[in-house]
Image: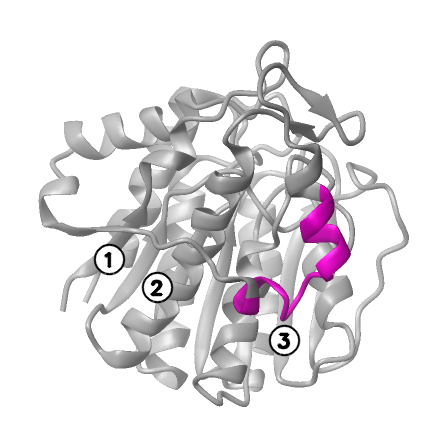
């Protein structure tokens, strides 16, 4: 079965403008690296559908959706907060970003794809039920997880989040949902600077010291998070794939490399094959230094391709 590469042109069309770091060139950098390494030749490229209101409303409030549509500008930008800007076309792009995760879940659950990577923007894991934040409008991974437990009736869906920033939105949405487990690392005292706690057996949040190396982060996954993920026995693994922990990315102080992302993905795939028939859906989150982003995603995709 092929690896699905789910994306949509709308995700490259909106532009918050300078000095915002969440720019269209992020997806172009990924695409360029996949072409250069001939990886795109072996992927099944699929256009992401737009998420329906029903799919979005499993994790977001009606009034919140209505607010985004009402405030999206015809030109220029509107700031929802210091980090999250609306620009023309962003709500359409966000619908396709959310729809990518939903469609990818359907593809792997039906056996039409071995696994999937969703090359989409805006990112999602900071978005809460009624609040946009951290560049995120809709929580793409949460919407995919809600689809998996509602439509596919899964009892154990895991979210592995290795973005440099804590996925506060995903945590808040699923804190009381026993069918979803969260396994997350992030830099301590980095955005969002809120209290972070874990729930034994189901939500595992591990804060990393600034300047933590790839070797140190691998050890934490080996000793703590991957044993917990194995114990959870996921039927599907969703990945909030943020690459802003790379040592070349100024958005964090972590010191990861593309080899570390490849190792993480290899280990996730091993666990998914053990418990979930290899079903993994990865959705792009952060990563803002274009060269390291492209290289890291290429390494991640190569590992997702592994048999």
Q: Of label 1 and label 3, which has the lower sequence position?
A: 1
Asked whether the beta carbons under mark 1 and mark 2 sit within 8 Å of each other, the answer is yes
* Prevailing secondary structure of the magenta residues: helix
Position in image of residue 48 (x %, y %): 33, 52
The image quadrant of residue 132 is top right
Check the image and report above or below for 287 versus 113: above
Q: Which residue is mark 1?
A: 4
Say whether residue 282 is left or right of residue 147.
left
Where is the N terminus found, in terms of image quarters?
Answer: bottom left
Tell which tag, 3 or 2, sits nearer the viewer.
2
Q: Which mark is residue 181?
A: 3
Residue visible at 70% across and 49% down? 66
Comparing 85 with 31, the one in front is: 85
Position in image of residue 194 (x %, y %): 88, 48
The residue stretch that appears in magenta? 54-67
Mark 1 neighbour class, 10 Å CA radius: few under 14, some 14 to 19, many 20 or more: many
Q: Is residue 224 visible?
A: no
Q: Which residue is mark 2?
A: 104
Position in image of residue 55 (x %, y %): 53, 67
Comparing 77 with 272, the one in front is: 77
């Amino acid at each position: 079965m092929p690896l699905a590469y789910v994306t949509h042109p709308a995700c490259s069309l909106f532009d918050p403008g300078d000095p915002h770091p969440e720019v269209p060139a992020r997806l172009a950098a990924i695409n360029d690296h996949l072409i250069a390494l001939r990886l795109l030749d072996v992927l099944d490229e699929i256009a992401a559908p737009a998420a329906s209101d029903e799919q979005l409303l499993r994790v977001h409030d009606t009034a919140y959706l209505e607010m985004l549509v009402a405030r999206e500008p015809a030109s220029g930008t509107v700031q929802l907060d210091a980090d999250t800007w609306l620009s023309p076309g962003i709500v359409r792009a966000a619908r396709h970003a959310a729809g990518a995760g939903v469609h990818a879940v359907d593809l792997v659950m039906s056996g039409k794809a071995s696994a999937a990577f969703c090359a989409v923007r805006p990112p999602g894991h900071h978005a809460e039920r009624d609040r946009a934040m951290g560049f995120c409008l809709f929580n793409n991974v949460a919407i995919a997880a809600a689809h998996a437990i509602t439509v596919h009736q899964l009892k154990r869906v895991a979210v592995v989040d290795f973005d440099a920033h804590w996925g506060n939105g995903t945590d808040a949405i699923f804190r009381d949902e026993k069918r979803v487990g969260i396994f997350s690392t992030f830099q301590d005292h980095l955005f969002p600077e809120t209290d972070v706690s874990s729930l034994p057996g189901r939500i595992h949040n591990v804060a990393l010291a600034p300047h933590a190396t790839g070797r140190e982060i691998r050890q934490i996954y080996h000793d703590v998070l991957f044993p917990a993920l194995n114990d959870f026995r996921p039927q599907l693994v969703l990945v909030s794939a943020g690459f802003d922990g790379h040592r070349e990315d100024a958005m964090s102080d972590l010191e990861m490399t593309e080899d570390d992302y490849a190792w993480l993905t290899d280990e996730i795939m091993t666990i998914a094959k053990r418990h979930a028939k290899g079903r993994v859906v990865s959705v792009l989150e952060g990563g803002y230094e274009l060269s390291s982003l492209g290289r890291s995603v290429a390494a991640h995709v190569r590992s997702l391709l592994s048999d």
